[in-house]
Amino acid sequence: MATFLTRNLKSKMTAGERRFYDLLAQHLNDDYLIWYNLPLQGNYRRYPDYLIFHPKYGLLSIEIKDWAMKALKKLKGHHQLTLDFGQGESTYDSPLEQARSSLFPLINKLKEDPLLLQTEGVYKGKLIIPWGYGAVMTNWEYQKITDVARGAIETLFPRKTTFYKEDILEGNLSQTEFIEKLHGLFPYQFNYPITFEQATRIRARIFPEFIVNADQQVFF
């Protein structure tokens, strides 16, 4: 079972967040560290619905929406859309854009640590781990999107980076298929592991908890 590092999880979740929690708990092993609704410091506090870290695969930000398809009124470019929940139309950043932007404060914080940067090759100066983001649309059935609308919707909700309703219904995806789709959110992979110290530093910067390494150095 995945390792959840946020207390009192389910009491605060929407129905869609609980459903995705169950899939993460069921399909991922305890090497996956998961935070729910964790504030990441930036110009203002942003809260990814789920932040997932694995020392081998990298860091993911997941945004979950329980929107009904009928609330969608208009797509605006590649990053915004207009929705109406019964109180008039409003414009929102897309879930993928929310997931991406909520991760930036943490990425910038990690880049401040020289031990978390690549030291050679084409990725020199970049983070030692891949990072990515995805959206979960708990009430949108991909198969019900018409051929006419599908192309437009996929500009904001690509199949590769979006979990639709079919993807999160119990039994629809096997454990292998679920993990493959989750890992597909990463734009690339590195073929070498990070060290325990590097993993500890990343974890300490995700959440300001005290972690002591073998040399009694404290990260917080």
Image: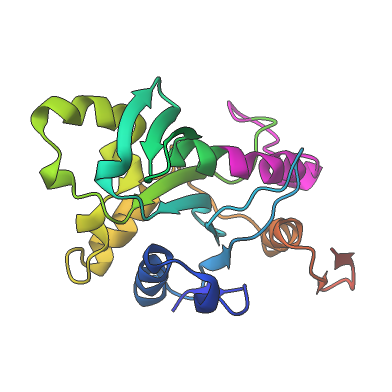
Residue extending furthest toward the front = 87
Q: Residue at (18%, 45%) from the top-left corner?
A: 142
Give the main secondary structure, helix, strand or loop, of the magenta stretch.
helix
Image position of 180 (left or right of 151): right
Q: Residue at (53%, 51%) from the top-left corner?
A: 58
Q: Nearer the viewer, residue 208 or 82?
A: 82
Q: Residue at (61%, 44%) from the top-left corner?
A: 103
Image x and y of residue 40, in percent? 70, 51
Is 83 magenta? The answer is no
Is 110 magenta? The answer is yes
Specify the quadrant that holds the N terminus: bottom left
From which residue to which does the magenta span run?
101-123
Image x and y of residue 10, in percent? 50, 77
Q: Is residue 149 visible?
A: yes
Specify the quadrant that holds the C terminus: bottom right
Image x and y of residue 77, in percent? 40, 19
Q: Nearer the viewer, residue 132 or 90?
A: 90
Count the marks: 0
Q: Is residue 188 visible?
A: no
Q: Which scheme is used to colour this image of the protein? A: rainbow
Vertical order, 131 against 155 (above or below): below
Image x and y of residue 124, in percent? 66, 30
Q: Nearer the viewer, residue 68 or 57?
A: 68
Q: Residue at (72%, 48%) from the top-left corner?
A: 45
Vertical order, 11 against 86 (above or below): below
Vertical order, 94 against 135 (above or below): above
